[in-house]
Amino acid sequence: MTIDAAPVTVLLADDEAMIRAGVRAILAADPGIEVVAEAGDGRAAVEAVRAYRPQVALLDIRMPKLDGLAAAAQIRRLAPGTATVMLTTFGEDEHVARALGHGASGFLLKAGDPRELITGVRAVADGGAYLSPRVARRVIELNGDRMARVPAARDRTAGLTDREREVLGLVGAGLSNAEIARRLHLTEGTVKGYLTSIFTRLDVRNRVQAAIIAYEAGLAG
């Protein structure tokens, strides 16, 4: 990031003020991230997105008036340029699975490594997807018998070209299109073309679903 680059703008929504204070303090450690608004319930979160148009909305799954999943759905309709990231705990397995199917850009643990929070916010702001590694493993477990899913994922990715497998692995690692392009010495347009092909071949709707397959297939380093 250059000195003159604008900070990543974030909405933070959680009904517990102490959680919000802790997350805000972690994000404040990165001068390239700015929390522009806070909300204590899902309805207020949607209104804050309408007012501030942040790049990232960090949403607790359990909130009054409107839960995080419903708020995320409204935010995606109202402000498709705002990436939604779910703040979760291990006790919310069913909600994590639902959020995965509804296009969340990331999942972060409230009690996770603070560095993951900053990395995740930056990744989704730059067009990537991010799953806390522990959340990724749990989601894989929720989706069924891991011993059965690993060979199934490898079979699904076997039809990809070597370059598509490289791109998928980097998606699984949370890299954005720009980062993948730099890593593989490609243009962003070329990366987008690969992703379109990958999503079609794997029959997935978004980067997080693709990332799960990358994890299961052993492509995400």
Image (cartoon, rainbow, N blue to C red):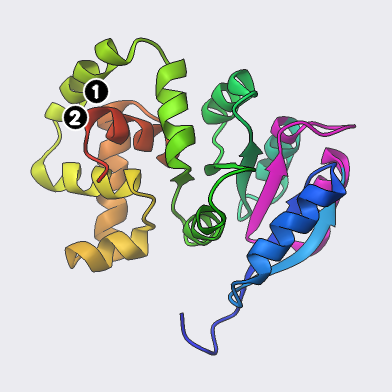
Assign a secondary structure to mark 1: helix
Assign a secondary structure to mark 2: helix
Residue 34's image quarter? Answer: bottom right
Compared with 183, 79 (above or below) is above
Query: Where in the figure is residue 172, as x and y percent of width and height?
Result: 33, 43
Report the amino acid beneath label 2: Thr
Q: Is residue 206 visible?
A: no
The answer to whether residue 55 is magenta is yes
Marks 1 and 2 in Cβ contact (< 8 Å)? yes
Residue at point 12% right, 28% down?
158
User: Which residues are drawn in magenta?
Assistant: 41-69
Report the amino acid beneath label 1: Ala
- The residue under label 2 is 157
Residue at point 59% right, 72% down?
30
Q: How dense is the environment of label 2, judged by Cα within 10 Å: few (below 14), some, or many (20 and up)?
A: many
The answer to whether residue 114 is magenta is no
Query: Where in the figure is residue 10, as x and y percent of width and height?
Result: 68, 61
- The residue under label 1 is 153
User: Position of 90 compared to 183: left or right?
Assistant: right
Q: CA distance from mark 1 to mark 2?
A: 6 Å
Query: Where in the figure is residue 151, as x and y percent of width and height?
Result: 19, 17
Query: Where in the figure is residue 21, as x and y percent of width and height?
Result: 79, 57
